[in-house]
Amino acid sequence: MASKRSLLCLLVILLVSSVRSVSLAAALVTMEAESGILGAGFTNGSDGGIEYISISTDSVNSGNPGNVDRVATYTVLFPESGTYNLFARIRVGSDAFNDDSLFVGNGFGAKSPTSNDDWLFVNNLAAGGYTAPGEIVAGVGAAGSQVWKWVNLSQFTNGVGETPRTFSVTPGNLEQTFQIGAREDGLAIDRLAFGTVETAFAVSNLDAGTLPPSVSLTNAFPGPEGTALHRFSPISSGVNADGANPAAGLSSAGGLLFGTTLNGGLHGKGTAFFVSDDGSNFMVFHAFGSAADAGHPEAGLIPAGGFFGTSLTGGANGTGAVFVGGTNGTVAVLHSFAALDAHRGTNASGASPSGSLVLMGQALYGATAAGGAHGNGVIFSLNTNGTGFVVLHHFSPLDVQTGTNVDGAVPRGGLVLSGDTLYGTASLGGAGGNGVVFSIRTNGTGFTTLHSFGAMDVASGANADGALPCGGLVLSDNTLYGTASHGGHGGAGTVFSVGLDGSGFEVLYHFSKMDTARRTNADGALPAAGLVLSGNVLYGTAAAGGAGGAGTVFGLRLGGGPFTTLHSFSAAATDGTNADGACPVAPLLRLGDSLYGTAFTGGPGAAGTVFRLPLMMTPATAGIFRDTENTVVIHFRGAPDSTNVIQATTSLSPPVVWQDISTNIADPGGAWRITNSILPIPTQFYRSYAR
């Protein structure tokens, strides 16, 4: 299987025309256990002000309560329709696993106390549960016995190996009857609660009967005008409210930024979220990992009137999936990758796709990092409706001694399309055993290795061209640009370019060697993501190095221009926390005059961040033409789409007084112009700055 960072990619298509108008309603309804209609076998008790119910005798039944005396009935008025989890505040007695089971009605309505089909057997409550106010009551938990704790009854397995199902409330049927049945006399029940499935309820919320606040943390972090748009919250027992460890870049649609997290969320298998570009309106619209859902999304979401994605795990066989979903929380698996041979790691279709998909018309193209005929991954195509899955290429076996082959192995960075040809990287294999750049036509013919990265020095990890390319490629003017995560002169990776036909391979930048003790350097190290090209500047992330040893955001001007470290993420404490995030492993998104990205770890929750940084602006140049005695036309060229303020003064002698005369937006080529009418004066000076 692929590494954990390569676990999931999800295919999410939004089913709404305007994502700004979509909201996920949260709802919670609680009831005291003693408020129901109790069968004669129940007793009431009190523990330090906590009123509870329990049953007076044990039952030997494991399929149903046995009689009406052991059934409690409640009338529940739901605030709105939706799908709900069932929670309970309980205390397991001193006999632990002999005091920890009950029955839950199999759906709403009155049940027969002697029918196994009418009841779900909920067992093994002794070890689970949550007590701390900030803990999210999502998974099983580990609170133990003889304490008051909240449990999510929808997460516990019953006596026949099934999962107690959620409860669906339809419009017009908000009032429902619900029943529980007693089994063991040592189980005390204080309170019951129904909460919407896509809402993260903490112990404090269930105690107070209140909805959690929306998760939105917008805080400045040290850096060149940088902003942490969202800081993911700490995980407890693998779960949290908003997700953890974003391994994918962001996409933009409807004025919002969309992304995924690899881990965390209500089921511990990642989330899909959106956030405004100013950090407001953060919302998780899907928590991955329930039933046959996708899980652990590593790749970004591809917008196309919606979003497409893949998952490293999940699907019918747990080996990954292509899925479609919406901001209402629904996800449907379009394709499940086949089960792997337990010994060889092979299958017919590939497994664990980790890179983003490419869309052309009604066809999707992608790659898997595992599986296939030789266990080294495949390139595949699939129709957007889930039909027509085809493997275009199986990556060949690696030599067991040298790790080399002809075509590469383990593609992780996604694909880029030009005409009828796909281009990508494979992180291993090739003639040097350190990965390749390849091309292949969309019909599966013409696979070509464009460049094989060379062998590395055993001691230093250095080589001439880089090694282990994990990120995707960016294409401009018949040239591909990418990163290699290792190798190069410093053993810390490279930025490279290569022609579409494999000619003209060039290393544009060698990342410097890191300090062996502190893992720091000036420019960053181990670039694991692809690049974004804006104007004549390549922007990217390095997962390590920098002043804090936690990675960098960088810019590299083409044509022999300078390399600039835009931001060094601050050093993380021993618990993994810092202010701004750490270990950025995803590509950047350029919007306007800003770069948006994700950091895999760090932040106050040690679970990563979403951040924004300004573009590295191209210095503006100007040409001035005097049309008449009183009018000049000034032509400027600077950063594409940048916002620029033009100022003028009549003298450069101190004190210089500059006055704003114009604010202009550069076109995609970086050009703009102004016409300025001036008095008949001998001299006028101008300057511009990017805002």
Image: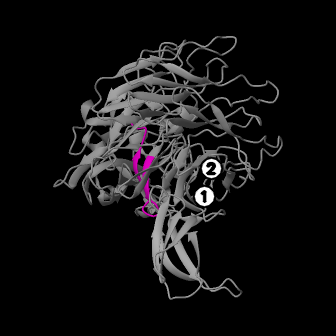
Q: Tag 2 or tag 1, which sits nearer the N-term?
A: 2
Percent coordinates x, y for residue 335 in the rendering:
35, 28
User: What's the residue type where badge 1 is placed?
Assistant: Met
User: What's the residue type where badge 2 is placed?
Assistant: Arg
Query: Considering only vertical position in the picture, is 678 above or below 590?
Result: below
Front residue of this view, candidates 96 and 314: 314
Number of the front mark, 1 or 2: 2
Left or right for 675, reference 586: left
The residues colored magenta run 272-291
Q: Is residue 462 magenta?
A: no
Q: Residues within 10 Å of mark 1 (few under 14, many from 20)?
A: many
Query: Considering only vertical position in the picture, is 68 above or below 62?
Result: below
Query: Which residue lies under the disc numbered 1?
Result: 616
Secondary structure beneath disc 2?
strand
Front residue of this view, candidates 466 and 235: 466
Q: Quadrant of the N terminus?
A: top right
Q: What number is the disc on residue 557?
A: 2
User: Residue, x 82% and y 27% (percent of image)?
Assistant: 459
Q: Quadrant of the C terminus?
A: bottom right
Do the numbered discs 1 and 2 sit on residues whose CB atoms are within 8 Å? yes
User: Residue, x 63% and y 86% (percent of image)?
Assistant: 657
Front residue of this view, candidates 546 and 287: 546
